[in-house]
Image (tube, rainbow, N blue to C red):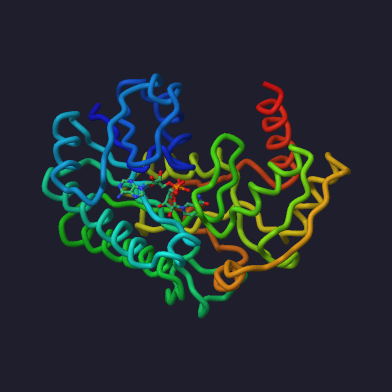
């Protein structure tokens, strides 16, 4: 089997995706490519690690050829909140990175290319509840614009050059293992950390803000299940994946069920406008039909698991 390259491997999703892929395919089969963030020693020791700037196509190409890479999981990106603070960097990294991995996949006939998209692709014209898979995408953030352009480019490379590009539109991803990288749904992870550390939390969106979220094990499962799906069954290249949607207040309530002393207030900042431009839930029937998408966690199960894991980490 050709090897797998994960870009953005030291990011929130990349870190755990690398471990899940290594568990499934073997340690040496997965090349983790980080960028500026220094990985932990434990991460470096877990298997092959390289530094890669995805904007350097030659560097990417060398890495792919010298390691016999057949599949790329492209996770390197600038996220929504950081993207609104630095729109040019967001454009350059997100567009340049996607174009480079698509070109390398095309030229070297890679087996598969998985690129993470986001609910930020939708924008304000799409029904906010049960947002359809095939919708008119008119995002109002630079991050969303780059995600739509990435989806269109990937689909173009599939149709024109046969690059086996596949993508999921991930909702806000919540993890006990890695901190989020500057997205609009970061309040959910921050709330759990504050609760477990016995701190008060000031949430940067209103308490009635509803966004779709997903626990990390399900986000990893969505990427890996789609990568392994039978291509003959796929009618789409890009898929909505839904898991759970809740009010910011409901998340706080689920935490106080386990940690009754936890207290939270709400002071919306610039990220409220980003959240208000995103859907509240997604229609993921295409993912269910075409590759049997089936998430595992709901809010109570996630809260219970998050708190148990974070308390375990804190006790060390
Ligand atoms: N985390 C979420 O809630 C979420 C939700 C929807 C979609 N996504 C998507 O999933 C993917 C992974 O997200 P994440 O949460 O792990 O993000 P993250 O910010 O935690 O990680 C992204 C990584 O990309 C790296 N990077 C930045 N510029 C780079 C460059 N020029 N070359 C190489 N690497 C570079 C960063 O160092 C970082 O480690 C992204 O495409 C993101 O848009 C994430």
Residue appearing at x 77%, y 44% in the figure: 199
Return the x and y of residue 189 as percentages of the image width and height: 63, 47
Can you say whether 159 is above or below 10 in the image?
A: below
Between 138 and 136, which is closer to the camera in this rendering?
138
Task: Pick out the residue farthest to the bottom.
Answer: 125
Q: How many marks?
A: 0
Please indicate, yes or no, whether residue 145 appears anywhere in the rendered image: yes
Name the quadrant of the C terminus. top right
List the single residue furthest toward the right: 260
Tell me: residue 187, above or below residue 216.
Answer: below
Residue 130 visible from this viewpoint = no
State whether residue 125 is above or below residue 181: below
Q: Is residue 291 left or right of residue 89?
A: right
Residue positioned 72% across, 44% down in the render: 194
Residue located at (19% from left, 35% from top): 63
- Residue at horizontal 40%, vertical 55%? 78
Q: Quadrant of residue 269?
A: bottom right
- Name the image quarter holding residue 79: bottom left
Q: Please indicate whether residue 253 sits to the left or right of residue 153 in the image.
A: right
| Residue 310 drawn at (x, y percent) | 68, 33
x and y percent of residue 139 in the render?
45, 74
- The N terminus appears in which quarter of the rendering? top left
| Rendered view: 48 above or below 283 | above
Q: Residue 11 in the image: state x and y as whole percent.
A: 44, 42
């Amino acid at each position: 089997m050709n090897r797998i390259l994960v870009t953005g491997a030291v990011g929130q999703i990349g870190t755990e995706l690398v471990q899940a892929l290594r568990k499934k395919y073997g340690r040496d089969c997965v090349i983790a490519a980080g960028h500026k963030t220094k990985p932990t020693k434990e991460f470096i020791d877990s298997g092959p690690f390289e530094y890669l700037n995805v904007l350097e196509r030659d560097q990417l190409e060398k890495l792919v050829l010298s390691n016999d890479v057949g599949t790329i999981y492209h996770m390197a990106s600038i996220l929504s909140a950081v993207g609104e603070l630095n729109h040019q960097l967001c454009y350059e990294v997100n567009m340049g990175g996607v174009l480079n991995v698509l070109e390398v996949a095309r030229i070297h006939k890679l087996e598969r290319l998985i690129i993470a998209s986001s609910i930020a692709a939708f924008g304000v014209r799409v029904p906010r509840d049960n947002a359809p898979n095939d919708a008119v995408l008119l995002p109002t953030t630079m991050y969303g614009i780059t995600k739509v352009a990435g989806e269109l480019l990937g689909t173009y490379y599939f149709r024109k050059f046969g690059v086996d590009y596949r993508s999921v539109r991930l909702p806000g991803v919540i993890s006990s293992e890695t901190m989020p990288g500057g997205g609009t749904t970061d309040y959910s992870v921050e709330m759990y950390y504050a609760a477990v550390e016995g701190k008060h939390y000031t949430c940067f969106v209103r308490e009635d803000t509803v966004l779709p979220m997903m626990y990390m094990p399900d986000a990893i499962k969505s990427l890996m299940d789609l990568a392994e799906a039978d291509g003959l069954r796929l009618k789409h290249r890009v898929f909505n994946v839904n898991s759970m949607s809740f009010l910011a207040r409901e998340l706080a309530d689920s935490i106080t069920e386990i940690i009754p002393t936890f207290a939270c207030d709400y002071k919306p900042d610039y990220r409220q406008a980003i959240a208000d431009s995103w859907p509240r839930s997604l229609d993921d029937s295409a993912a269910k039909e075409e590759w049997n998408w089936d998430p595992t966690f709901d809010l109570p199960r996630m809260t219970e698991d998050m708190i148990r894991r974070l308390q375990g980490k804190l006790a060390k």
